[in-house]
Image (cartoon, helix red, strand yellow):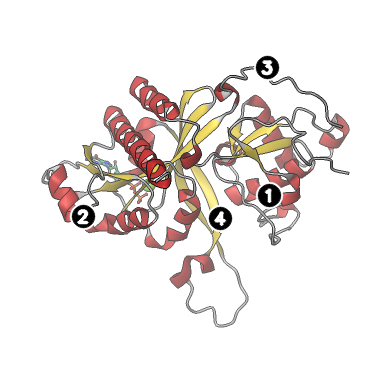
Amino acid sequence: MAYERSESTGAGDGADTSALALKILVAGGFGVGKTTLVGAVSEIRPLRTEEQLSRAGELVDDTGGVDQKTTTTVAMDFGRITIRSGLSLYLFGTPGQDRFWFLWDELSQGALGAVVLADTRRLEDCFPAVDYFEHRKIPFVVAVNCFTGARTYGAHDVSRALDLDRGTPVVLCDARDRDSGKEVLIRLVEYAGRMHTARLLDSVG
Amino acid sequence: MNDDSGGERPSVPGSQWYDAEAGPLVRPYAMTGGRTKPGPSNVRFDLIALVVVDDEPPGPAEEALLGPEHRSLLTLCRAETQSVAELAADADLPVGVVRVLLGDLLESGFVRVSRPVPPAQLPDERILREVIDGLRAL
Ligand SMILES: Nc1nc2c(ncn2[C@@H]2O[C@H](COP(=O)(O)OP(=O)(O)OP(=O)(O)O)[C@@H](O)[C@H]2O)c(=O)[nH]1
Ligand SMILES: [Mg+2]
């Protein structure tokens, strides 16, 4: 039976009564510093998902009609940043290997945006991630992890080399450094905000 | 019967709730009773879907019937509103298993699970401003 429910508590905006969770992905090639970055800005915890190998495509090509489903465990980096009570940022570092692409489809759903980590010594490793987010129109920034010993390139060079859309931010960072990692996230959130506003304006004509 | 229809549930502004009718999810392990097959209408809880204990949960008798994994999830939820991902990390269980267990807890009325708000539907830009300021202050 329906009962009257007083909506008087915080009726005005109600913002503080609804918990909000925002998702940010950290992607990039193998060993580029994803785990390091997530760990620098949040308390990192490993997250296990189990996936059927057959979903990963090419992996099993010789099943030979054997009805055997192999389940593999995929570990992701997972970190939470509490902005305030009821507002948290969740970071997910996705495995670098290509065969775990399918994980991204789920992760990227409803994501606020993504950080694509790049290493200028093997810039091509981040092409797939760049393509992925561009195609799905998910706001992303490219964060160049400046490993010692790597020649430093300017953000412009990287932007050109990656043939990024105009406006896609490129940030030089040190994934081990908390402030540097924070700056990367800030740039992403700012950019995501601009992208969403632009789309909103587009959609109203 | 379930009289969950309409707006009788107090709804939290800005979130939607998965309903019990959506049914359980992928069920790959023994602790899930060997259930592995998702039905056609099944929803996968998002990793950042938030889980809260229901404000009118079943009684202690029913709770006593829950398995240890169900109960440990419930304990975690009671401590604090948790995301699906956090529950999996804290309980040290694979995400798929946690999804199944949560599906059970949802069906039996112990918890409620909120659908995350897509960024495109964020109430306003102030939220992102808040996030930026919060990050700076970290
Ligand atoms: N010198 C230097 N080393 C770094 C930096 N970032 C990461 N490393 C090191 O590089 C190695 C790989 O970093 P990870 O954070 O594990 O890389 P990842 O992207 O998570 O790797 P996968 O998950 O295996 O793809 C580690 O030994 C880090 O300590 C950096 O900015 N400078
Ligand atoms: Mg890693």
Chain bearing mark 3? A
Q: Nearer the viewer, mark 3 or mark 2?
A: 3
- Tag 4: amino acid: Glu
Badges 1 and 4, same chain:
no
Q: Nearer the viewer, mark 3 or mark 4?
A: 3
Residue pointed to by mark 4: A50
Contact check, label 3 and label 4, Cβ < 8 Å: no
Q: Which mark is residue A8?
A: 3
- Reading the chain from its start, which is encountered first: label 3 or label 4? 3
Residue pointed to by mark 2: A162
- Reading the chain from its start, which is encountered first: label 3 or label 2? 3
Chain bearing mark 4? A
Q: Residues within 10 Å of mark 2 (few under 14, many from 20)?
A: some
Structural distance between the alpha carbons of marks 1 and 4: 13 Å
Q: Residues within 10 Å of mark 3 (few under 14, many from 20)?
A: few
- Reading the chain from its start, which is encountered first: label 2 or label 4? 4
For label 3, being within 8 Å of ligand 2 is answered: no
